[in-house]
Image (cartoon, helix red, strand yellow):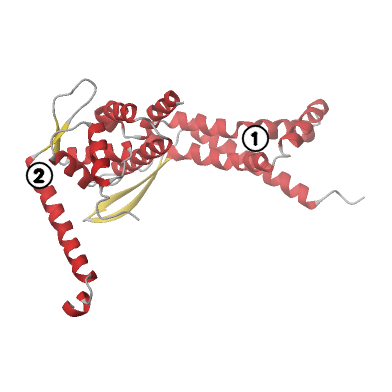
Amino acid sequence: MGDVTSDPEVLLLVSLAGGPKHGHAILLDIESFTGRRLGPGTLYGALSRLDAEGLIEPIEAEGRRRPYRLTASGRTELHRRITRLAETVRVGRRRLAPGGRLARG
Amino acid sequence: MRRHRGRIARFLLLLYPAAWRARYGEELMTLIEESGTRGTDLLDVARAGIRLRLAATLPTDGGLPMLLRSAHRHPTAFALAGLLVMLPTLLLAGLSLLGHELGVGPIAQRVDPMIAALTESRAVDVALVLAPALALLVAVAPLVRVGVARDEGAPVATVAVRLRAMNVAVALAAVAIGLVLVWHAAVELSGPPAV
């Protein structure tokens, strides 16, 4: 079962929020903050969807590597998604607190 | 081994839609080379390719999207693949018919031990029997277009059929071999004639 941060698109947006990166750097970055390694196909599938939606964009190539960066709409979208995620976490924590579910309905 | 995996990964890129490959193919290959290909990576590359291929064929803004786009683009390749799949069964059944039904004795003497040796393995036996059915599906795939169109917003399944001589010929050959196998099984099940 995946956890709440298993959405590769969110992970990729979070990674690029820290600055432009190429594929391998994104892979290593995500591994460093989730402890999980995304497959290259999963990563590039998510990357191409975000690129098509205008949430990220390629910048000048470094040899065979193509770095990407977050666009303004990508930043807005990431904010929207993590706000929703934070709300889910907040509700979950409240309900897990002793007597929380019964006390607050 | 690693070089082989790189080659396999490049081959798996064929699963991706052509436009996607043209835009991201080399970048994905660079990532695979830099990150060190693992066995699970190959599965991941294949799975992502199939997902993207399916996503590219699903309906977007109406029209008649094709679920069998590859087959439609390469009907001759599919016909040849069907022929290749059933070739061993076709050869064995053909030689057996020549030997036993048309009475060409020398052929029967040679083909019978060959068939007995091959069908000793249950897996080979089953594969030889199922091959015509698989060949039929592969040959017919380019002839049928199944899709989903939008009718006032509601999805509607659509089916269209076209004819291509080569695919039809391979499909008919597959059906013919299938009938021969069924007939042969029926003769065997009915047992030897009473004396």
Task: Tell me which residue sits at (15%, 61%) in the image.
Answer: A87
In the orientation shown, which residue stands out farthest toward the left?
A: A72
The image quadrant of residue B89 is: top right
Q: Chain of mark 1?
A: B
- Where is residue B158? Give x, y as percent: 34, 49
Residue B93 seen in the current view: yes
| Placement of A36 over or under B83, stated as above or below | below
Taking depth in this image into account, of A51 and B172 the one nearest to the observer is A51
Q: Which residue is mark 2?
A: A75
Residue A54 seen in the current view: no
Callout 1 amino acid: Thr
- Where is residue A42? Give x, y as percent: 30, 41
User: How packed is label 1: few (under 14 Cα within 10 Å), some, or many (20 or more)?
Assistant: many
Name the front one of labels 2 and 1: 2
In the orientation shown, which residue stands out farthest toward the right?
A: B195
- Where is residue B156? Give x, y as percent: 31, 54
Callout 2 amino acid: Arg
Task: Tell me which residue sits at (51%, 31%) in the image.
Answer: B81
User: How packed is label 2: few (under 14 Cα within 10 Å), some, or many (20 or more)?
Assistant: some
- Where is residue B72? Give x, y as percent: 39, 35
Q: Which residue is mark 1?
A: B89
Callout 1: helix, strand or loop?
Answer: helix
Task: Tell me which residue sits at (32%, 54%) in the image.
Answer: A2
Kindly identify which numbered label has been placed on residue B28: none
Taking depth in this image into account, of B55 and A93 the one nearest to the observer is A93
The reply to whether callout 2 and callout 1 are in contact (CB within 8 Å) is no
